[in-house]
Image: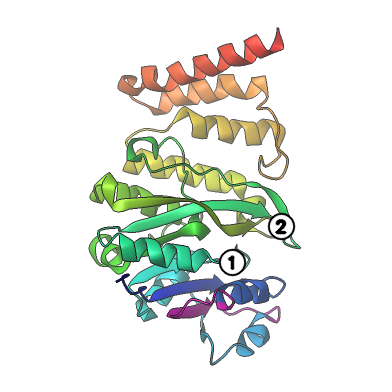
Amino acid sequence: MPEALPRVSVVVPSLDQAAYVRATLESLLSQGYPDLEVLVQDGGSTDGSVEVLREYEGRVSVRVEKDRGQADAINRGLARATGEVLGYLNSDDVLFPGALRAVGEAFASRPEAVLVYGRAAYVGPTGERIAPVLTRPWEPERLPDLCYVAQPAAFFRREVLEEIGPFDESLHHAMDYDYWLRIAARYEPSRVVHLDRELAGARLHPEAKSVGRWGRGLEEVLDLLERRAGYVSLWWLVAKWDHRVDGRLQALAPHPVPWRAYPPAILEFLRRNPPRVWKRGLGGAFRGFRKRLAARR
């Protein structure tokens, strides 16, 4: 007899997303999942979002109150949640059809699982697919080098919230990455499940925090990695200097990293990291250089 699907609670932190929040809620409510709780935590929107949210009262739990930022809004929603499986979906992102059933079945069939995540795609303002989000199977030792867990496609068991605590409210961009790092430090790799299925769409638009404040978000990631991992990977530093030199976001405008981004990235890598990690970080970079040189011949 198959295991019963667990109750899933999804928090929707929202602030001034009237253009997108309806699509977010519809993507959740149309899942057809038998035991779903949706909790919207609005920080006091003034763009008409609250009026949209009121249309969904009775089907979702809506709370409008000032908060101290996105992480605080997520934590307030999680404090109200009653589900065994928890997650959050930003009010401009969407879940793809069948996502919650795939997640619920994964948790039901793997009682030891604490985190289940799948693949995701970047979508544009009207929902058009732009590109895949970089994801890969769980390798905790690689997580400081690369955030390969797509937040809108990730769900965790209540046990995680109880054991490692809420999201870090001092973070404004990397609170999800910080949470995955904390999970990696706490639990055995066998307790994390990667689904090879596209579950969610992360929306890119001019007002999105990940677009308009990408440079600021990268600096927060670098500081986070120094604190959590004890080193900063060269990959993240190349991303920082690529953005400074080129100014474009890879997801919106895929492009080869300019050669001139590498020297300052390598110098910062040497400055910020202890010598014990130099070989590990620079070895991969030089292998990449050789491949690029070979491709140009």
- Residue closest to the eye, 141 or 17: 141
* Dot 1 alpha-carbon crowd within 10 angstroms: few under 14, some 14 to 19, many 20 or more: some
| Residue located at (50% from left, 19% from top) | 285
Residue 118: x %, y % from top left: 48, 53
Q: Is residue 5 left or right of residue 122?
A: left
- Asked whether 174 falls inside the magenta stretch, the response is no
Amino acid found under the numbered disc labelled 1: Pro
Tell me: residue 168, above or below residue 276: below
| Residue located at (67% from left, 87% from top) | 51
Amino acid found under the numbered disc labelled 2: His
- Residue closest to the eye, 7 or 108: 108
Quarter of the image with the N terminus is bottom left
| Residue located at (35% from left, 57% from top) | 115
Quarter of the image with the C terminus is top right
**What secondary structure prevails in the magenta region?**
loop
Q: Which mark is residue 205?
A: 2
Q: Which residue is mark 1?
A: 97
* Dot 2 alpha-carbon crowd within 10 angstroms: few under 14, some 14 to 19, many 20 or more: some
For residue 67, say whether it is visible: yes
Residue 228: x %, y % from top left: 33, 43
Tell me: residue 179, above or below residue 85: above
Residue 30: x %, y % from top left: 59, 76
Range drawn in magenta: 29-48
State how far apart marks 1 and 2 are (Cα). 22 Å
- Give SS at disc 2: loop
- Give SS at disc 1: loop
| Residue located at (32% from left, 35% from top) | 230
